[in-house]
Amino acid sequence: MVRDMTTDSPTDNSKLQARRSFLRGGLAIGGAAAAAAATSGAALANGDPNILELKDWNQYPGDGVDARPYGAPSEFEEHVQRKSVPWLTADPISSVNFTPLHELDGIITPNGLCFERHHSGIAEVDPSEHRLMINGLVDKQLVFTMEDLMRFPRKNQINFLECAANSGMEWRGAQLNGCQFTHGMIHNVMYTGVPLKTLLEEAGLKGNAKWLLPEGADASGMTRSVPIEKALDDCLVAWKMNGEALRPEQGYPLRLVVPGWEGNMWVKWLRRIEVGDKPWHHREETSKYTDLMANGKARRFTWEMDVKSVITNPSPQAPLKHDKGFTVLSGVAWSGRGKVSRVDVSLDGGRNWQAARIDGPSIDKSMHRFYFDFDWDGSELLLQSRAIDSEGYVQPTKDALRAVRGENSIYHNNGIQTWHIKKDGTVENVEVS
Ligand code: MTE
Ligand code: CO
């Protein structure tokens, strides 16, 4: 267990702020609002300086419109950060950091908080010098500039990207204390780009074209074999994320989007696509990104990310800050096979389940947001969420997963997560069996 990564303890000030905004916006919520109003009423009687005293921002004009040509978050949000796990990798060049899922809501991951996974650091590519080549089993070998690509008909897609190693450190038991670290190798972004199918049709596929080898322009020379059926189905060659240019961390100026499939295949800084008639069996699909089974054999080409969910609030980095009473529980769910059709929540370690409310857009191979509003009686809880996708696949328990896959795996851990809520509202990563 990694204690020093549990941060974000609330200050009294932030508690007060939260109560004030609840009072302002919450008049229609009935019992819960009444309870909050009573607390705020007491604060008012004691002369809450946050109400009675003028602040600087009440009296002096702020920055003008020229001060922030490309905006950044409020300085009070400085604690909201991607974080790494220091002992996990030998150096930060070939490493990973994690999306702070417990600080986010809705379904879109802000660009500056998308987790990063680099095998050779961030390539700083000049788009005017960047080229995309298509070669191999095609009628015409082609080279595109960025301007060339932008002349093709465009498409927008919201998709999650999950690293196959997400939750990998949890295979043998509960270890990392925070959903940022247990589940944060995921982001959910709207991409703009040209369908890969359009570019392949421009080049003209030969009859024996069965596989593609996308290659990155970074020093790792990342390559993966992608079957032609997937390439012609829903892959995108993308240059925008959430409306703005890809961030350098995410592969600026060009990346491959492979919806629902493991993040490793989403080649960043995409420079070349070779068309072939069989897979290449490169490093990332042999020694890595394969699943070692109990009998010593490895499963290969396990591309799809199966249905999965996690409760983000409360969680170890986001403890319950109020006494018993009305409580909003929230989390995210996703499936590489389609939509999430249902999420169930258990308060007692999986004995009883109740349906959560999915809110916001429900999109194929995208993150879904769920809420579960309940009256916390102040007792200890064992919180779990279990997602079910549009194919009818049900997220398994960790025990069920290990019964099939053994103890040796790293990748494709979609087991049910348990958070132990203590009476004081603090939360710990545990396992139940
Ligand atoms: N592409 C290149 N060129 N180099 C890389 O190191 N890492 C891969 C993939 N594409 C990688 C890459 C891995 S393992 C993952 S999980 C995703 O990119 C991470 O994407 P992100 O950094 O946008 O989160
Ligand atoms: Co990865």
Image (spheres, helix red, strand yellow):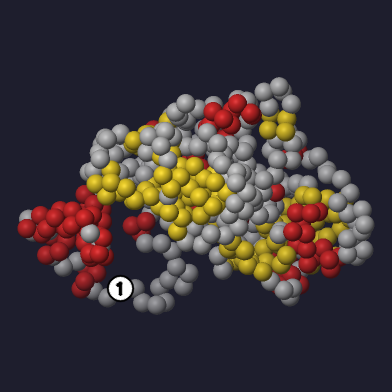
* Farthest residue, direction bottom: 65
Task: Judge by depth and name the residue closer to the eye, 211 or 100.
Answer: 211
Amino acid at circle 1: Gly
Tell me if 10 is positioned left or right of 39 in this view.
right
Is 407 placed above or below 227 here? above
Residue 358 in picture, x, y percent from top left:
46, 55
Residue 431 location, quadrant: top left
- Report the residue at 59% width, 28% height from top: 402
Tell me if 23 is positioned left or right of 77 in this view.
left
Tell me if 91 is positioned left or right of 138 in this view.
left
Task: Judge by depth and name the residue closer to the eye, 35 or 272.
Answer: 35
Task: Judge by depth and name the residue closer to the eye, 56 or 169.
Answer: 169
The reply to whether residue 96 is visible in this rendering is no
- Report the residue at 36% width, 77% height from top: 64
Residue 353 location, quadrant: top left
Identify the residue under disc 1: 62
Is 271 placed above or below 277 here? below
The reply to whether residue 77 is visible in this rendering is yes
- Report the residue at 81% width, 54% height from top: 228
Residue 333 in picture, x, y percent from top left:
51, 49
Residue 214 in picture, x, y percent from top left:
77, 53
Q: Quadrant of the N terminus?
A: top left
- Report the residue at 86% width, 65% height from top: 203
